[in-house]
Amino acid sequence: VTIGGGRGLERSKVTQICASSSACALLGSTPQSRITPSSVNFASCVSNAQSVKALEATMAMHLLQQYTTAYSVNCRGLAHDVASAILQSGDVSKLPLWLKELCMFGSSTLDGNSGLFGHQPIPKENSIIADPAGLMRLFIKHHQYGEACDVVVSILSKQLSCSKDATSSRLPEKGSIDYVPYDLIDMLWNMIESILTTTAQSNSSGEDVKSQVKSLIKKRTCMENALEKHFESLRISEEGLKSARTLSWA
């Protein structure tokens, strides 16, 4: 940097300040390149634009969450429609966690009165009706089979966390029926098996494909374990129902 008089000194000082504050990362990555005010300003503008865009995206997602949660009370299936629109846009590979939970569990926590994948016969006031089976079909439609497995695991695992007394005291003849879409789960299982077979027969699979297959196998194994625990819970519940019927008839 040339220093030649007062104005030259002032300009050199500005250049030093800009280089040390705004372009330190650029200076470290290209030690032999010369940092000029124009390059510093350009890098700063790009960084600011990216920050503004990220902030706008975050604010938009917060607004989407607020409106979806608020209007889902009176507009049944809105959360599912929002999830479908997001996946169809292709801009987001995964649904936000709040939207998945809204589709799976609705606005209330899963308790002994839940029907698992089924709907409540009489929804509570100001409640959002969940549709986990619909979310499963949506994931399958968009070839996100691992996410569909996660839905099964989440629903069955949360039900198992409830107390056994509450589960065994629910009588089917009084409307307490648990619905599990076994045919849909079988279809998901077979589709994953077909993918694994096709991938195993292909010799041109890259590391990225192998990593995805490994993750898919892990998710399907988790779904299998959740189903095994679910069937064991059904056996225990059958024994508890005998006592519950005796008490209800007494």
Image (spheres, rainbow, N blue to C red):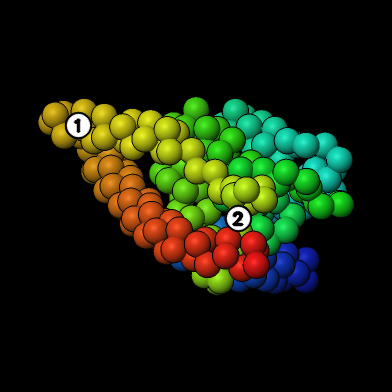
Q: Which mark is residue 171?
A: 2
Residue 18 picture location, percent across and down: 67, 65
**Label 2: how many residues lie within 10 Å, few (<14), some (14-19) or many (20+)?**
some
Q: Which mark is residue 128?
A: none
Whether residue 76 sits left or right of residue 193 in the image: it is right
Q: CA distance from mark 2 to mark 1?
A: 43 Å
Identify the mark nearer the N-term, 2 or 1: 2
- Contact between marks 2 and 1 (CB within 8 A): the answer is no
Furthest residue in direction front, as rendered: 250
Is label 2 in a helix, a strand or a loop? loop
Q: Which residue appears at 66% of the width and 48% of the height? A: 175
Residue 99 picture location, percent across and down: 66, 48
Q: Nearer the viewer, residue 61 or 28?
A: 61
Q: Which residue appears at 59% of the width and 35% of the height? A: 134
Is label 1 in a helix, a strand or a loop? helix
Classify the position of the N terminus by image quarter.
bottom right
Name the kind of residue labelled 2 in the image: Leu
Q: Which residue appears at 72% of the width and 58% of the height? A: 108
Q: Nearer the viewer, mark 2 or mark 1?
A: 2
Q: Which residue appears at 38% of the width and 31% of the height? A: 187
Q: Which residue is mark 1?
A: 197
Q: Nearer the viewer, residue 203 or 222?
A: 222
Q: Work out whether residue 138 can be spotted.
A: yes
Residue 84 picture location, percent across and down: 63, 32
Image quadrant where residue 208 sits: top left
Q: Work out whether residue 162 can be spotted.
A: no
Name the kind of residue labelled 1 in the image: Thr
Q: Nearer the viewer, residue 2 or 246?
A: 246
Classify the position of the C terminus by image quarter.
bottom right
204 to 116, vertically: above or below: above
2 to 131, vertically: above or below: below
**Label 1: how many residues lie within 10 Å, few (<14), some (14-19) or many (20+)?**
few
